[in-house]
Image (cartoon, rainbow, N blue to C red):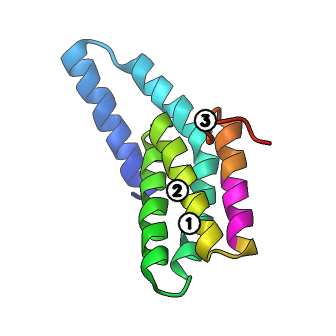
Amino acid sequence: MKKSEGVLLLLALSTHLTNELGGGRELLLSFLSMSEKTAPALAKLETLLPLIKSLPAGADRDKLVDEGEALQRAVAAFHMEAIRFRMHNVERLLKTVGGAGHQQAFDDLRHALETAGFHTRSHSAP
């Protein structure tokens, strides 16, 4: 989704909530606040996904691309449980087919998500 499309979507959402519920400004402001928190993580995903897609073709690479794209959707939707689940899957697959550059991009993504307040592991890091 282009930035301009996102702005139009937000305006449509705000208008709909105002018309249907007599409010919506608070929800819109909450959404904008959360999207500001996730923007750095989405930018890191925009770096990681092309790296993943550039890996040699194969079943593991295809799974990794699918998981990476699902992670991108989870981050955009602020879905905490899906983020943790997809991060685990991407990390596991990167260990199989990724290199040092992929791991660094993944670590940068994890840092951006954790800075935004998302839990990316099901346990504390060692």
Q: Is residue 79 magenta?
A: no
Q: Which residue is mark 1?
A: 93
* Residue named by callout 2: 89
Amino acid on which disc 3 is placed? Phe
What's the residue at 42%, 78% (across, down)?
59
Q: Which residue is mark 3?
A: 118
Q: Label 2's element?
A: helix
As shown in the figure, which amino acid type bears the numbered disc 2? Asn
Callout 1: SS: helix
Between 2 and 84, the residue placed more toward the observer is: 84
Q: Which residues are magenta?
A: 102-109
User: How far apart, in angstroms, are the residues tagged by discs 2 and 3?
Assistant: 16 Å
Most common secondary structure along the magenta stretch:
helix
Q: Are marks 2 and 1 in contact (CB under 8 Å)?
A: yes
Mark in the foreground, 2 or 3: 2
Residue drawn where x is 73% and y is 73% of the image: 101
